[in-house]
Amino acid sequence: MFNLTPRRALIVYTNGNRVVRALRHYGIIEYVSRRMHYVVLYVNQADVDEVQAKISHLRAVRRVEVSARPDLDPTLADLELTGVYQLHDEDDKK
């Protein structure tokens, strides 16, 4: 049976492009911006803290950020309750 492993994206800001080869050992590289000097790296959810600490100690890495996407509510229900976002129905237009 196929089991899906939960993953989390790490955005790694680098000083140069030479560190990209070293980052392949820590996870799956999804995207490399050579001009903006950042890498999107996917790692297992269980290993995020450990990998983030290891990557941040590399010489050419400026900073490492954890993606907030899995923590966001895709239905925007929390924004509706605060009043920041409101659904627009046909009845509201009158």
Image: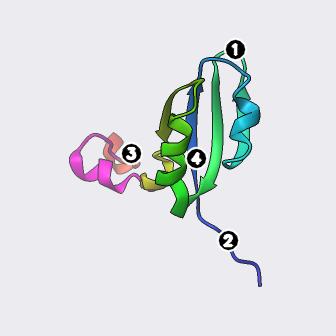
Nearer to us: label 3 or label 1: 1
- Earlier residue among tags 2 and 3: 2
Q: Return the residue at label 2.
A: 4
Q: Return the residue at label 4.
A: 9
Is the residue 32 above or below the residue 43 in the image?
above
Disc 1 element? loop
Going 76% across and 78% down the picture, which residue do you hit?
2
- Which region of the structure is painted magenta? 75-86
**How far is mark 3 from mark 4, CA to CA?**
33 Å
- Earlier residue among tags 2 and 1: 2
Residue 43 on image: x %, y %: 62, 53
- In-front residue for pair 49/40: 49
- Earlier residue among tags 4 and 2: 2
Kindly tell me whether residue 74 is visible in this rendering.
Answer: no
Q: Amino acid at mark 3?
A: His
- In-front residue for pair 85/64: 64
**How far is mark 2 from mark 3, CA to CA?**
36 Å
